[in-house]
Amino acid sequence: MKLVITIDTEEDNWGAFCTSGHTLENVDRIPVLQEIFDAYEVRPTYLVTYPVATDARSIAILRAIEKSGKCEIGMHCHPWNTPPFGEDLDEFNSMLCNLPEDLQYRKMSVLNDAIIKAFDTRPVAFRSGRWGFDGRVARNLCRLGYKIDTSITPYTDWRSSSGPDYSKIPPYPFVFSQGKVSGDISDTRLLEIPASVGYLRGNWAFCNTVFNTLKKTPLNRLGLIGLSDKLNLLNKVSLTPELYEGEQMIKLARRFLKDGHKVINMFFHSTTLKAGLTDFDKVNTDENLFLERIKDFLLFAKKSGIESIKLSETLKLKF
């Protein structure tokens, strides 16, 4: 099994749907993170937004790492701060998949060109901001020459945030075909490497059916999902140090190994590297805790023989 690490590398202004006025102090913490990756022979994929790709200091930090061969650069599109502008700045339009297809393409094209100019490299990997992805986004990616998407969070429904519903999609990589997501994308050849989300109990299809049933009101009001986790009946876990301790992520990885998966995808935001910017990291002491969670998991991966690869290198795997 291979490990990819995908990092939404973005501006500090968490949750602010604005076109300008961004700060990028969190990017200054990336060299510390990269030192940890280097120590464990990890080659991450930094998925960058437009403010990052057009900021001289951020470019210098990431370009030095990329040119040394220790990472790769991909695209992470926040539509609210990627030109051209014109749509209303609200939660609905913060989901790239909710914009008209032509406007999607123009924004993605501008960001793609900015990344090529900044890093002198042509990106092939993409993640949509706020996980806002569908078949039209996939078509636009193919028009721009992208080969990989990592916008899908399996077993997760984002409709309450005006986003897509991935609640019935398992965490297996696949090549897009008609019916996988909304929209006809049967003419595309795009590899999906989902974020790693699963159930520690195995038999994921059954667990997911039970989980979705318990979520429905009035059952959800009874707190049955929390109770089932305490009783180790379901235990839905995501491979992200923003939400889970090293021990829980390791258990999930072992489940992926047991089930014969070829790749796992750890994911998080660069903004969590600096305290106070996100809901995941409120006080300064949490910065070290966050890094310790990453170290714990990487130590397990190294001892288990799980090799780290760049996201683009999953194209060489057979799924």
Image (spheres, rainbow, N blue to C red):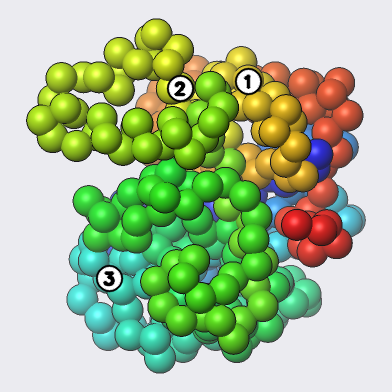
**Which quarter of the figure is the C terminus placed in?**
bottom right
Tell me which amino acid carries mark 1.
Lys
For the residue pair 269 and 118, the one nearer the viewer reads as: 269
Identify the residue at image location x=25%, y=81%.
Answer: 87
| Callout 2 secondary element | loop
- Relative image position of residue 56 (x, y in whole percent): 63, 66
Label 2 crowd (10 A; few <14 / some 14-19 / many >=20): many
**Depicted 173 relative to depicted 263: above or below:** below
| Callout 3 secondary element | helix
| Callout 1 secondary element | helix
Residue on which disc 3 sits: 93
For residue 58, side relative to residue 276 (left or right)? right
**Which quarter of the figure is the N terminus placed in?**
top right
For the residue pair 312 and 167, the one nearer the viewer reads as: 167
- Mark with earlier residue (1, 2): 2
Quarter of the rendering containing residue 9: bottom right
Residue lying farthest to the left in this orientation: 218
- Mark with earlier residue (1, 3): 3
